[in-house]
């Protein structure tokens, strides 16, 4: 059964750090590119970061560059999003997603992803 399960969300003060994890199964997801998206109340879903199946290529939205790091461990079937220097505007539900292939031009487009997790809440207090 296709499944993406996020964990690691929570409440943190501004300037703090959190690391999100997304466990994926079945093992065939190790050949998929993975992305992180977020959605704040009343706002559209927003692309955050993506990583190729090998982990050799990554892509970030401008607002998180230098603060967030996406990585993956295919042996553990897990993709991570390390979030540093968090800001109140980072508050959102964060979801991981999977798609075949890694193309910079379309990695930001949620419609290009085939599978989604349920999401984990991240709240950053000021």
Image (cartoon, rainbow, N blue to C red):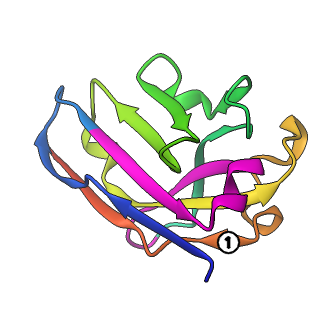
The picture places residue 84, in percent across and down from the top left corner, at 30, 26
Q: Taken as a whole, is the magenta stretch helix, strand or loop?
A: strand
In this picture, which residue range is highlighted in magenta? 19-42
Residue 77: in sight, yes or no? yes
The residue drawn where x is 74% and y is 37% is: 52
Task: Please say whether residue 32 is visible from this viewpoint.
Answer: no
- Quadrant of image for the C terminus: top left
Q: Nearer the viewer, residue 74 or 119?
A: 74
Left/right of residue 110 with respect to residue 122 in the rendered view = right
Q: Is residue 55 magenta?
A: no
Residue at 34% from the left image edge and 33% from the top image edge: 83
Residue 36 placement (x, y as % from top left): 55, 50
Position in image of residue 57 (x %, y %):
74, 25
Which residue bears the numbered disc 1? 115
| The N terminus, quarter of image | bottom right
Q: Quadrant of residue 54?
A: top right
Q: Is residue 50 left or right of residue 87?
A: right
Q: Is residue 20 magenta?
A: yes
Picture layout, residue 104 above or below residue 97? above
Q: Position of residue 85 (x, y in %)?
A: 27, 24
Picture residue at 52% right of the left edge, 33% below the top: 70
């Amino acid at each position: 059964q296709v499944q993406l399960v996020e964990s690691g969300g929570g409440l943190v003060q501004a300037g703090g750090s959190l690391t999100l994890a997304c466990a994926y199964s079945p093992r065939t997801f190790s050949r998929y590119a993975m992305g992180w998206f977020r959605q704040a109340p009343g706002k559209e879903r927003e692309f955050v970061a993506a990583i190729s199946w090998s982990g050799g290529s990554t892509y970030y939205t401008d607002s998180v560059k230098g603060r967030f790091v996406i990585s993956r461990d295919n042996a553990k079937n897990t993709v991570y999003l390390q979030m540093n220097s968090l800001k109140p505007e980072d508050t959102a539900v964060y979801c991981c997603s999977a798609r075949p292939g890694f193309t910079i031009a379309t990695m930001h487009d949620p419609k290009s992803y085939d599978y989604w997790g349920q999401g984990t809440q991240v709240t950053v207090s000021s």
